Amino acid sequence: MRNPILVIFAIVLAVSISLGLSVSDNRNFELSKNLSIYQSILRELNIAFVDDINPKELIDKSIESMLNTLDPYTTYISEDELEDFRTMATGEYAGIGAIIGKQDKYVIIVEPYKNFPADKFGLKAGDKIIEVNDENVIDKEISDVSKMLKGKPETYVKIKIKRPYQDTENTFKTIEVIRKKIQIQCVPYYGIVNEDVGYIVLTNFTEKAETAVKNAMIELKSQGAKYLVLDVRGNPGGLLSQAIKVTNLFVEKGTTIVSTKGKHNKWQKKYIAKNYAVDKNIPLVVLVDESSASASEILAGTIQDIDRGVVVGTRTFGKGLVQQTRPLAFDAQLKLTTAYYYLPSGRSIQKLDYRYKDENGESGKNDSSTLVTEYKTNNGRKVFDGGGINPDYVIDNFTLSRLTTYLARKYIVFDFASQYVAAHPSISPASEFIISDDDFQDFKIFVENKNTDYNSEASEALTTLKRIAKKENIFDEIEDEVNALEQKLSTDINEKLDTYKKELKNIISYEIAKRYYYQNGAIQNMLSSDETLQKSVEILHDKEQYTSTLSSSFIHN
């Protein structure tokens, strides 16, 4: 077994050599000196510390702490984590093809992917995993169970499960699943809305993103799409190369898409559209939100800067940093930030400046109130750097109520869907399905029987007030007022459920539709209540509004 201290020394030595270590260079001398000190400390701890130490644990923590002083995106990827990292980049892995989650002490099946092994061999959303290959997994972490479920293609994994609302208390099922190569779909849905608007959902920029979006565009156009909406809401980004290629599908060959600037000349690059567009003229809307980041912002920002289409939604995340991976010793990797990227207008949309920290160690923030520099799109429209992409049409982001979020986070909506499925062999088509008022009454009873510990934000604030008042010996003076307010806030949870009935019915219907029609159907189910999408369709169908939005006289609202 390799000595972890020798491993870390090999890593830092390789880094030192790659940086061109020179004794005459003061900075590099300091680096060399401190690496030597670091190695000496580890050696002495290993030899002389009173208790046995875990060198790998110490080293991993020291690496993590060191990298945390830079930015959140510069990370050490150990050999054990390399497979998960590759999955994020490629969207591929070998396993059963299901999303899993943790509910209380159980790891559960949250969603089996359609036509992949978990689905084909009969695993269902809601199944509680009891054993994997005869090993008890109750109370195990998700990451541990995930590793057990993954493995070489064409190998078997035996999974013992309990199915809520269908099995009796002591009834279990054992299902043998053949692992397969899994390709996570980066375009989980595309289709025609409002008769002639093509709609594509892009969830990440993995290696197949360009192909998936291109195929969806071609298919939608063959079905009569005259307009297009590309939805990157919630898309955290991915490969820079795929951001460029997906953007290229909509822009002329030779168009500048993005530039990068880093410490070294090799990172000073301008990325140009190399291919002919699939369609450079189709009216286009890009949907974004506060979770659209990195590659999503390159796409949306470039489309905006060259006036190729209209951006609709809420201000994006604001990640204007480029990462690359560098190989280290013993199959480890270092993912590090090497450059900033700049959109065609010349602006950067990086929100946080990690070079500067406040007294609490927090990075400086560029938000809408501190926009620094004005830039111009090709048509002369005003755009700004700092703080993400500001949409051409800002649609107030729909935020779920605190109660709905609580019921979803606690798996109460999820469990009700499992109960509903057990009692209903089928439902209406995904695009039409909505639970009835009677179903909602059943949900209220279901919640009541769960004995939830839900408190409103106001109730929690009042609890805090009481604690502080008692600590400062002033509670007796305000006790009557506090008790009166507490009584007003103690509304029966059934009344709270009625207050948010509309959004709860939508969320419950979405979860149930997913059980019958998978992710594709769940997305279809939400389309009719998606106000941002409906606004996009309105803009596309109003030629004058669309054109004027992209004209030089238009300023962002």
Image (spheres, grey):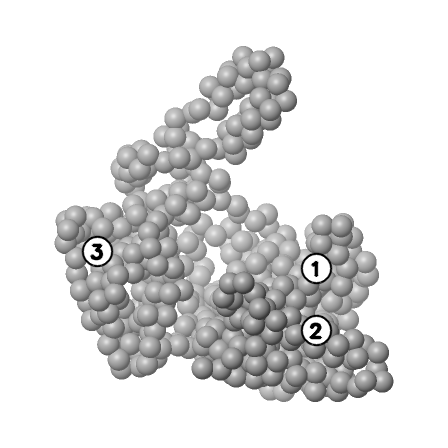
Q: Is residue 504 left or right of residue 261?
A: left
Q: Report crowding for label 3: few under 14, some 14 to 19, many 20 or more residues within 10 A (C-alpha).
A: many
Query: Mark 2 and mark 3: span between their CA atoms?
Result: 54 Å
Query: Mark 2 and mark 1: span between their CA atoms?
Result: 36 Å
Instruction: Please identify, in this view, whether the residue under mark 2 or under mark 1 is nearer the observer.
Output: 2
What residue appears at the point 56 percent right and 26 percent down from the top-left corner? 467
Please tell me which of labels 1 and 3 falls first in the chain: 3
- Amino acid type at circle 1 is Lys
Residue 268 in view, yes or no: no
Vertically, is 285 above or below 483? below
Q: Position of residue 120 (x, y in %)?
A: 23, 70
For mark 2, what is the residue?
37
For mark 1, what is the residue?
351
Q: Are marks 2 and 3 in contact (CB under 8 Å)?
A: no
- Of the 4 image quadrants, the one containing the N terminus is bottom left
- Amino acid type at circle 2 is Ile
Q: Secondary structure at mark 2?
A: helix
Query: Mark 1 and mark 3: span between their CA atoms?
Result: 46 Å
Vertically, is 238 above or below 543? below
Res. 210 mark: none
